Amino acid sequence: MPAGAFDELDAIAAITRRTGRPRAGEVWAGDDVAVLHSPAEQLLVTTDVMVETVHFTRAHSPLVAVGWKALVSNVSDIAAMGGTPFAAVVGVCGAARSDLVALYDGMLEAAQHYRCPIVGGDLTDAHELVISLTVLGRATDSAPVLRSGAQPGDHVFVTGPLGASAAGLRELRADPGASGANVDAHQRPLARVAEGRAAGAGGASAMIDVSDGLGLDLDRLATASGVGVRLGEVPVAAGATLEEALGGGEDYELVFSAPDWGEILGSFEDAGLGAPIRIGEIVEEPSLRSLAGQPLPPSGYRHRMDGSGV
Amino acid sequence: MPAGAFDELDAIAAITRRTGRPRAGEVWAGDDVAVLHSPAEQLLVTTDVMVETVHFTRAHSPLVAVGWKALVSNVSDIAAMGGTPFAAVVGVCGAARSDLVALYDGMLEAAQHYRCPIVGGDLTDAHELVISLTVLGRATDSAPVLRSGAQPGDHVFVTGPLGASAAGLRELRADPGASGANVDAHQRPLARVAEGRAAGAGGASAMIDVSDGLGLDLDRLATASGVGVRLGEVPVAAGATLEEALGGGEDYELVFSAPDWGEILGSFEDAGLGAPIRIGEIVEEPSLRSLAGQPLPPSGYRHRMDGSGV
């Protein structure tokens, strides 16, 4: 054990006691690997790494919120396929013991909320705090909804107003003690798992989560599909600017295309969800990205160097 | 994209071109998540994080070897369940572009060797180099072989001599230009996937890979099983010391218990593998750890703060 490491076994024992009991027939932490029931059909896998000062600062997010958001951002990638998460593994580097407890508080709270237990992990020393998460999911009510299936004539929907997270960050930068709905949206975002399933069940042709900004994420969807996008109006969260709604990211709303508006509305209603907001349409011209007749730049925060999120 | 990041899209495009084509019906990098065929029964998941200066130094391992070893050490955890790896996702933080290429060279070579393609990942800036890997596997010829199934009277086997990796590291510390079998064992270890499957098929009752040192890893197996271990003699790799064989780690040989010596030998022979070496037996007294009548300390390198490897 390198110098500076805290008592690993104590810390792990404290954490694993809190992850809950494995499901019947499963083995979680404590062996070489976790043993899980395999989903019946397709397996969804996503991984993300969050680095202090690159992806978050403690000044704007307490570590319990960082832990929550780390898990939620990965769950959101599963949601963006119309899938359901079922397990996570986590790697944490460079966390002092008290920091680790706070991080895990947040991750475990999100794990419980999304029924996505943390089934294993790895803790190591490092000079900076790095959180690595891999979330596994299953396809649920539909085949996985890729980014690449949008067709000219499809409607474009978003599951809610955008920009709240960026507005909350702006408020926190002005006043670290700020609170309210936008601060909550920044520190404790929600993944739209039920909405993603409803979109898939309603025939969504392509879907992505708004993690880096609508402009950038919608550009990725359109590029993958080889189509253009013409937007009318974008719903802006209360207290947010249009720029924050278009480029802020981390709202984790889902944006998707679908050929049949009525089928989408029916599917959301069947699921007991509010209707998604139609914001535009898919067009044939592959280079078109417009909002209210003006060019829509692929703005957003490219902190994920892969540009893919997988 | 934070200051200092290289051109992410270029780098990712170069890498994803090299991961090969997805299997039919699968989606790898480029969407929100990777979509994989689900294994028929049990799913095995393991994750590890490697941090520069904590787990490796470039002075003793070129980055291509670091990449190889990062993947192999996770594949080894799958092997220690008697499983077969089928996919990996990787997170890399803080790698300059040329470093990233070298790392991926090594990871992709290992991925090809073990038929464990890298199906997605995440790249970010950071101040130090961190590699996070999650490997997925399937149970193959047997139910997953846990650490906890050893029974008094079982034989204890190891799949090969130990200490070569530690000896290689010692040679490299004395002479960074050193070469030979032990240096290869340190820089380019092999995971014993075929051996793990043969052990499982031959009725192994408990198994673990020697990643942190025989003393420590065997102590974990015995503790999980609630049994003691009495060893006779341990095979020491040529050029290694007994201390290196017992405490060196990173050999990735498998150590396992099994009730029927003949069945194990037959299973290894059927698989075309050399016979594993019997090194002792499982005993009832749960606190016993002995080698040739002397106490066997749980020595080894506790760089994994979870003590589990999952």
Image: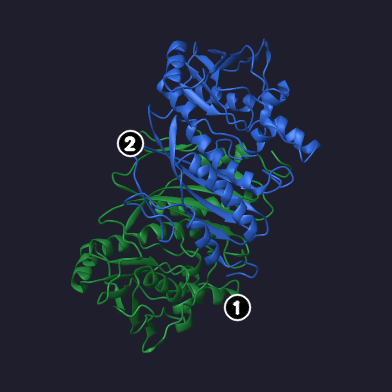
Chain colours: A blue, B green
**Residue B127 screen position, x and y as percent:** 69, 53
B132 vs B14, nearest the viewer: B132
- The image shows residue A116 at horizontal and vertical percentages of 46, 43
On residue A41, the disc is 2
Quarter location, residue A223:
top right
Q: Nearer the viewer, residue A193 or A297?
A: A193
Q: Which mark is residue B201?
A: none
Frontmost of labels 2 and 1 is: 2
Looking at the image, which residue is at 45% across and 65% down? B189
Closest to the observer, B10 or A161: A161
- Identify whether A135 is placed above or below B275: above
B148 relative position to A4: left or right: left
Residue A310 at x, y = what percent?
Answer: 51, 39
Q: Badge 2 sits on which subunit?
A: A
Pinpoint residue A71: horizontal percent, then vertical percent: 54, 43
The chain under label 1 reads B
Q: Amino acid at mark 2?
A: Glu
- Residue B68 vertical position relative to residue B213 in the rendered view, above or below: above
Per the image, the residue denoted by label 1 is: B174
Task: Tally the numbered discs.
Answer: 2
Whether A252 is drawn above or below A258: the answer is below
Residue at position x 61%, y 39% in the image:
A304
Residue placed most toward the observer, B173 or B154: B154
Label 2 Cα crowd, 10 Å radius (few <14 / some 14-19 / many 20+): some
